[in-house]
Image (spheres, rainbow, N blue to C red):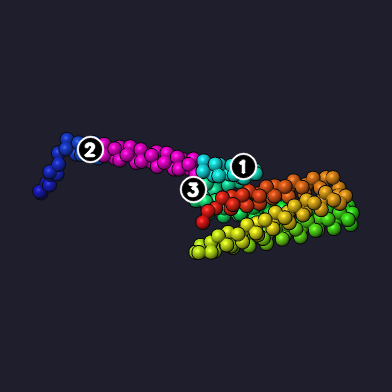
């Protein structure tokens, strides 16, 4: 009976296993360093984007509100003025939709006087108009470009300004008519937040240059 012997000695096999272990260890260390470097770069970039947003928000009437609402979108905005304005319009629209929902729920409360109900319903209509105008401004922003870009930006400003007017009309209605203090406080809080968001969006759009 013939016996086949391996050409690799036990010592060579052990050295091979050791070399493979070293190679695996080296690759693991390299990958770890690459991951750390990538994470550091990502963190640095995000901080740069947030600094850009914070600096630009200083041109608004409510810089803290501006930064707080937009810093979450830093990785998307980067340092692009147009993306910053689009994000500002988006958060303003979200605020308008939330406000509409809040005021609508309040209008369905029991015990409201007919005069209070009328004022609140007018406010709901104002907020709905604001939503339409913010959407129109978003559509106009999506069409920016070409030789008439400045005209298009003016249209955006017109829509956003109209939204602010409608929001303030709601506040004026609450102040002029006698409304339950608790109800008025809840509505004012939501509307004032919306007004700040919309005002910030307009201020950022005013910084666009074409």
> Label 2 vs label 3: CA separation?
48 Å
Q: Which residue is drawn at 26% across and 36% down?
A: 22
Q: What stretch is highlighted in magenta?
A: 21-49
Q: Quadrant of residue 68?
A: top right
The answer to which of 13 and 71 lies nearer the viewer is 71
35 w.r.t. 146: above or below: above
Percent across and percent down for residue 115 are 88, 56
> Label 3 vs label 1: CA separation?
17 Å
The answer to which of 58 and 113 lies nearer the viewer is 58
Q: Quadrant of residue 8?
A: top left
Mark 2 residue element: helix
Query: On residue 8, which mark appears?
Result: none
177 w.r.t. 16: above or below: below
Q: Mark 2 points at which residue?
A: 19
Q: How crowded is mark 2: few (under 14 residues within 10 Å), some or many (20 or more)?
A: few
Mark 3 residue element: loop
Q: In this view, does 6 lie to the left or right of 71?
A: left
Percent across and percent down for residue 86 are 57, 55
Percent across and percent down for residue 126 are 75, 58
> Which mark is first along the chain, 2 or 1?
2
Q: Residue at x 66, y 51 (%)?
A: 198
Q: Which residue is drawn at 36% across and 41% down?
A: 34
> Which mark is first along the chain, 3 or 2?
2
Is residue 45 rendered magenta in the image?
yes
Q: Name the residue under label 3.
A: 79
Mark 1 residue element: helix
Q: Name the residue under label 1.
A: 63
Q: Residues within 10 Å of mark 3 (few under 14, many from 20)?
A: some
Q: Residue at x 73, y 56 (%)?
A: 166
| Cβ atoms at labels 3 and 1 below 8 Å apart | no
């Amino acid at each position: 009976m013939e016996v086949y012997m391996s050409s690799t000695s036990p010592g060579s096999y052990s050295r091979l296993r050791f070399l493979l272990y070293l190679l695996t260890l080296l690759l693991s260390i390299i990958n770890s360093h690459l991951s750390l470097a990538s994470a550091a770069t990502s963190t640095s970039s995000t901080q740069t984007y947030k600094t850009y947003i914070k600096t630009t928000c200083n041109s608004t009437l409510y810089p803290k509100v501006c930064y707080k609402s937009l810093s979450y979108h830093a990785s998307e905005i980067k340092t692009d003025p147009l993306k910053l304005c689009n994000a500002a319009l988006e958060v303003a629209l979200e605020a308008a939709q939330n406000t509409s929902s809040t005021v609508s729920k309040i209008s369905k409360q029991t015990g409201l006087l007919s005069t209070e109900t009328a004022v609140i319903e007018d406010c709901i209509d104002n907020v709905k108009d604001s939503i339409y105008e913010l959407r129109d401004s978003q559509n106009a922003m999506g069409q920016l470009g070409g030789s008439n870009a400045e005209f298009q930006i003016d249209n955006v400003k017109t829509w956003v300004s109209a939204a602010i007017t409608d929001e303030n009309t709601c506040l004026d209605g609450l102040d002029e008519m006698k409304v339950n203090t608790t109800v008025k406080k809840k509505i004012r809080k939501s509307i004032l937040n919306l007004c700040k968001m919309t005002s910030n969006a307009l201020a950022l759009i005013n910084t666009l240059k074409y």
